[in-house]
Amino acid sequence: MKKNIFSIGATVARATFACAAFVALSAHAAEQPNAALVAHGEYLARAGDCIACHTTQGGKPFAGGLKFDTPIGAIYSTNITPDANTGIGKWSYDDFARAVRQGVRPNGDTLYPAMPYPSYARLSDDDMKALYAYFMHGVGPVQAQNRPVDIPWPLSMRWPLGAWRVLFAPKVQAFDGSHYNDAIVARGAYLVQGLGHCGACHTPRARTMQELALTDLEGDDFLAGGGPID
Ligand code: HEC
Ligand code: HEC
């Protein structure tokens, strides 16, 4: 009998604890509706190493300004914090998804493929939504003006980048892991080919700078090494 009372007591205690936890979670959810999504977005941002390119040494996280030398001059990564005026705070989800997966800014300009959007094109809509939630709600806004490119006109015009993009960047399409016959291998392929953008450095490039293969299905050059490293 005693045992039963104890076990009832334990059940009640567990239930009370669960309720309290639930209330605590709901209270938290009320002020931060996408807490789980934001946390997942942070995990994805780490997998994509966004911070490495979008932060200068000693600079504020994601405030941009890191220099990339290209054969025609230097470009600088941009402020991707949610600051409304100098960052991406006013960007809609569609603006963000288009820039990250297709390399197109809201004003229609094409990004330099130093931003590895040909790899990020593989990201699922769900992962894009989590990344957006993180950059809007998990990253602190930093006021930092983007630096213009150090490339002389007319080479600074961006329309040739648009032509490059149309010729060489893949269309956004859902990742199909079915031919890997193993869920864990498929998950790894999704990370390596997509967020990890391993090929951006580990796959050799053509003279026109596109990676010779963006997946293992496109040939032996994928991850074969010898890509130029800035
Ligand atoms: C290998 C370096 C690199 C990595 C990794 C990288 N970026 Fe970028 N990104 C850049 C550069 C450089 C630019 C600016 C390109 C230009 O000026 O055309 C850029 C531009 C952008 C832009 C456009 C911003 C604007 O104001 O036009 C967004 C949004 C962006 N990156 C988001 C991300 C996210 C999210 C990740 C991680 C999933 C990421 N980037 C990872 C280099 C990188
Ligand atoms: C920004 C460029 C860059 C990206 C992106 C990158 N790597 Fe690397 N990786 C390098 C360079 C450069 C080396 C060689 C470093 C050295 O020789 O010290 C290297 C070395 C390695 C090595 C050691 C290989 C050896 O023979 O010693 C492994 C393994 C590796 N990378 C895996 C990956 C994976 C997996 C990814 C994607 C998740 C990745 N790399 C993304 C640039 C990159």
Image: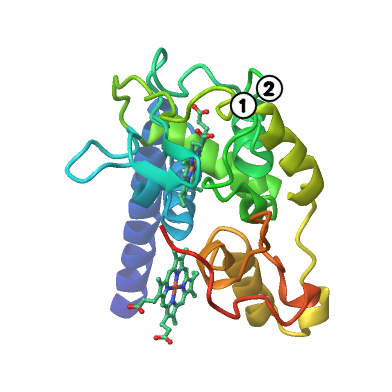
Q: Nearer the viewer, residue 108 or 211?
A: 211
Mark 2 in CB contact with mark 1 (< 8 angstroms): yes
* Residue named by callout 1: 105
Whether ligand 1 has any atom under 8 Å from the Cβ at mark 1 is answered as: yes
Q: Nearer the viewer, residue 33 or 140?
A: 140
Q: Position of residue 48 (x, y in %)?
A: 48, 55
What is the quadrant of the C terminus in the image? bottom left
Residue 158 in which image quadrant? top right
State the residue at coordinates (59%, 24%).
154
Whether ligand 1 has any atom under 8 Å from the Cβ at mark 2 is answered as: no
Q: Position of residue 177 (x, y in %)?
A: 76, 71
Q: Is residue 134 visible?
A: no
Colour scheme of this structure image? rainbow
State the residue at coordinates (69%, 45%).
125
User: Left or right: 60 with respect to 220?
Assistant: left
Q: Which mark is residue 108?
A: 2
Furthest-left residue in view? 58
- Vertical position of residue 211 compared to residue 154: above or below: below
Asked which secondary structure carries label 2, the reply is loop
Residue 186 in which image quadrant? bottom right
Q: Nearer the viewer, residue 101 or 165?
A: 165
Q: Amino acid at mark 1?
A: Arg
State the residue at coordinates (54%, 22%).
153
What is the quadrant of the N terminus in the image? bottom left
| Disc 2: CA contacts within 10 A as few (<14), some (14-19) or many (>=20) | few
Q: Amino acid at mark 2?
A: Gly
| Disc 1: CA contacts within 10 A as few (<14), some (14-19) or many (>=20) | some
Asked which secondary structure carries label 1, the reply is loop
Residue 31 in which image quadrant? top left
- Vertical position of residue 102 compared to residue 5: above or below: above
User: Left or right: 149 with respect to 1?
Assistant: right
